[in-house]
Image (cartoon, rainbow, N blue to C red):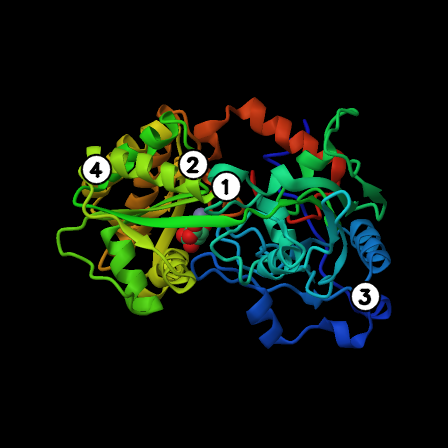
Amino acid sequence: MDKLPLEMAEQSYNKLTSITLNHLESLVGKDFISVDKEQFEKYGRDETEDLVFFPDVVVKPQTVEQISKILKHCNEQKIPVTTRGAGTGLSGGALPIKGGVLLSMEKFNKILSIDTRNLQATVEPGVINYIFQEEVKKLGLFYPPDPASWGSCSLGGNIAHSSGGPKAVKYGTTRDYVLNLEVVLPSGEIIWTGANTLKYSTGYNLTHLFVGSEGTLGVVTKIVFKLIPLPKFDMLMLVPFNSAEKACEAVGEVFKAGITPSAMEFMERDAINWSIKYAGEVNFAIKPEWEALLLVEVDGNNMDVLYSDCEIISNIMQQHECDEILFADTADQKASLWKIRRKVGEAVKSNSVYKEEDTVVMRAELPKLLRGVKDIGKKYGFSSVCYGHAGDGNLHVNIIKGELSDEVWNNALPKGITEIFELCKSLGGTISGEHGIGLVQQKYMSIIFPPHQLQLMRDIKKVFDPNSILNPGKIFG
Ligand code: 2HG
Ligand code: ZN
């Protein structure tokens, strides 16, 4: 019988044996391995909806050598291995859907070095984003990628998805700051993917291949990041609109005026209301007629330039019929506004069963995307809470289950989501800007890629992971 193409063949895995369990314990120590169901409950989840998949064992390695031996053994025994950072992912990337070994990187939590001569830092993947940002700031340095979950997400997880955040609009995403990676391959081989240089053109860029590979090609054990000087000042404006579409139309005009804000975030009314209800009051009145707001930040080293930029931005916003612009004058006011923005995802999750879509289009198409999402929602009977990184054309569409029947939710909704993604493609966009594909988006990959291109990705996966033990069932199934 002809061999089925990879995407057809159902990869078979072996169940864990006591021999493997004993071997894993001998490698990491009995305090760093667990088959406890409570542990499975914790490590079988990430932040994706309410999905949970139990692994067969949770292992917490402390050294690269342990990981090398774990992978070598699991590769020989054909046992799946799912690597987990902090479990804040939103596309199911860390869910051990085939059971096997859940490899938690939480013990890899050290900032190994900060090189102030070359503006570089070497860190372990379990370091929490915000902790790293604060450490480099003490030295007057800046690591810009700042996911909304920066207080809890790990840098390794940020590598897995090339995570972004509000600052990406000016400073780029994780991928733009990774110079080099130490990676353990399924064979147990330990490689460095690049060089600690700001420029690199030495064969295929394996560093960039691993960034965004969602734990499917290797286990990252060290990360060399580029850092930049910390801007001295920033100014933050809250720009309210009585029309969400006008807010989206104003976004592109700011850039056309020659200004690159350090953040340009959009929140429609429900996102504002739900987040304030969840995250706590704000010290300004939300007018009933406001339909949306933009959070616009500019940063730099010259306050006169920042004032001038804010004046230009204000004029553009007024041309798009914004309401009175509020300036956050104090650090507390800025923190309060950012907290409202950063808590939206959690607020939605606390309000309703929902599906999180991470749509992204060319920036000037944002008004069409927003209008299309609402029209498709009306057609299929679902409401949505929209917010996100307007400056990147990246709109988070949280589809709310609310009172929808399971029948509509499970059968009609995928058709609506398909139409949203087809709209994204028609607007020069794609189906994920920062949250990745993982488990929950893979059925929509064929909207963007023809079969032979998906096969190219599978073939690359097969080169690095011939037995498909790493994070199986993710990205392209
Ligand atoms: C954000 O920008 C994050 O708030 C999370 O990407 C989005 O939880 C979400 O839906
Ligand atoms: Zn986001």
Residue designated by label 3: 24
Q: Give the distance between the C-alpha atoms of the residues marked 4 and 1, in whole angstroms.
A: 25 Å
Front of the two marks 2 and 4: 4
The amino acid marked with disc number 1 is Ala
Q: Which of 241 and 261 is in front in this view?
A: 261
Where is residue 205? Give x, y as percent.
72, 30
**Upstream in the sequence, badge 2 or badge 3?**
3
Q: Callout 4: few (<14), some (14-19), or many (20+) C-alpha neighbours within 10 Å? A: some
Q: Which amino acid does label 3 sit on?
A: Leu
Quadrant containing the C terminus is: top right
Alpha-carbon distance for marks 2 and 4? 21 Å
User: Dot 2 corresponds to which residue?
Assistant: 392
Q: Is residue 130 above or below residue 474?
A: below
Mark 1 or mark 3, which has the lower sequence index? Answer: 3
Disc nearest the viewer among 4 and 1: 4
Q: Are marks 3 and 4 in contact (CB under 8 Å)?
A: no
In the rendering, at what x and y percent does residue 312 appear? 32, 34
Residue bearing the label numbered 4:
318
Q: In which quarter of the image is residue 124?
A: bottom right
| Quarter of image, res 94 | bottom right
Task: For the residues labelled 1 and 2, say whether their Cβ atoms are less than 8 Å apart.
Answer: yes
Q: Residue at x 61, y 28 (%)?
A: 455
Residue at left offset 44%, top offset 34%:
260
Q: Are marks 2 and 4 in contact (CB under 8 Å)?
A: no
Question: Which residue position holds label 1?
Answer: 168
Q: What element carries label 2?
A: helix
In this orientation, does residue 401 appear? no
Q: Cβ(mark 3) to ligand 1 < 8 Å?
A: no
Question: Badge 3: how crowded within 10 Å, few (<14), some, or many (20+)?
Answer: many
Q: Is mark 4 on a helix, strand or loop?
A: helix
